[in-house]
Image (cartoon, rainbow, N blue to C red):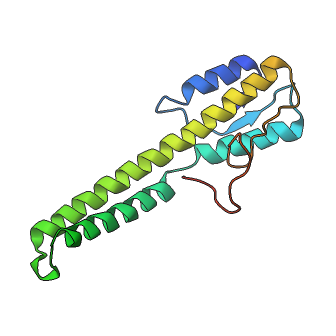
Amino acid sequence: MSTIASARDLRSLRSSLWSPNGLRVPYTFALDALSAAENERLAVLMNAFGGECGCNSGSFVMSAGVVAVIVRYFATGGRWAAVGRREWLWLLAATAAFAVIGKGIGLLWARWRMFRIASETLRRISDGDQQIDRQIDLQGDRDGTRMPGVAGLG
């Protein structure tokens, strides 16, 4: 378990987020400049984002990509009767590529949200400011909440 108790710890956390080993560590926050509730909230957010696998974005991009490939095939004059081994292999390769791309996007998005939380928290405690004008919501965004029930890419 990694305890974040100072600005130096936050800087270290920020830099470690871009390394392959930067996630999957349970984080606890013990920053004196923040309340116990805020420290707990930060730990919950960081651990949630650190545990994301990119499955939601992977499945979305894969599904959208497969639909796009199929629509393109038929829109360019392809016929169902002409679908053969080559077309099925192409669809299989495209499906795998879209899944990997989507998963990568989801993982990068999770790290970006963690980086933003660490940066915003560092700014807050460095300024000594207990109240900030833009709160980090439960999705890790600084600009307010999203539509209810939308957790973002993950």
Up/down of 82 relative to 33, above or below: below
Residue 125 in the image, given as x and y percentages of width and height? 80, 22
Name the residue located 68 percent from the left edge and 54 percent from the top edge.
146
Q: Quadrant of the N terminus?
A: top right
Q: Is residue 57 left or right of residue 32?
A: left
Q: Is residue 137 left or right of residue 54?
A: right
- Locate residue 87: give its quadrant: bottom left
- Locate residue 30: give its quadrant: top right
Up/down of 121 relative to 81, above or below: above
Q: Is residue 1 visible?
A: no
Residue 84 in the image, given as x and y percentages of width and height? 10, 74
- Toward the viewer: 111 or 123? 123
Q: Is residue 33 left or right of residue 96?
A: right
Numbered marks: total: 0
Residue 86 in the image, given as x and y percentages of width and height? 11, 66
Residue 37 in the image, given as x and y percentages of width and height? 87, 41
- Toward the viewer: 49 or 152? 152
Name the residue located 69 percent from the left edge and 36 percent from the top edge.
27
Name the residue located 50 percent from the left edge and 29 percent from the top edge.
18
Up/down of 68 relative to 22, above or below: below
Q: Is residue 127 visible?
A: yes
Q: Is residue 70 left or right of residue 108?
A: left
- Toward the viewer: 59 or 148? 148
Name the residue located 81 percent from the left edge and 36 percent from the top edge.
39
Residue lying farthest bottom? 81
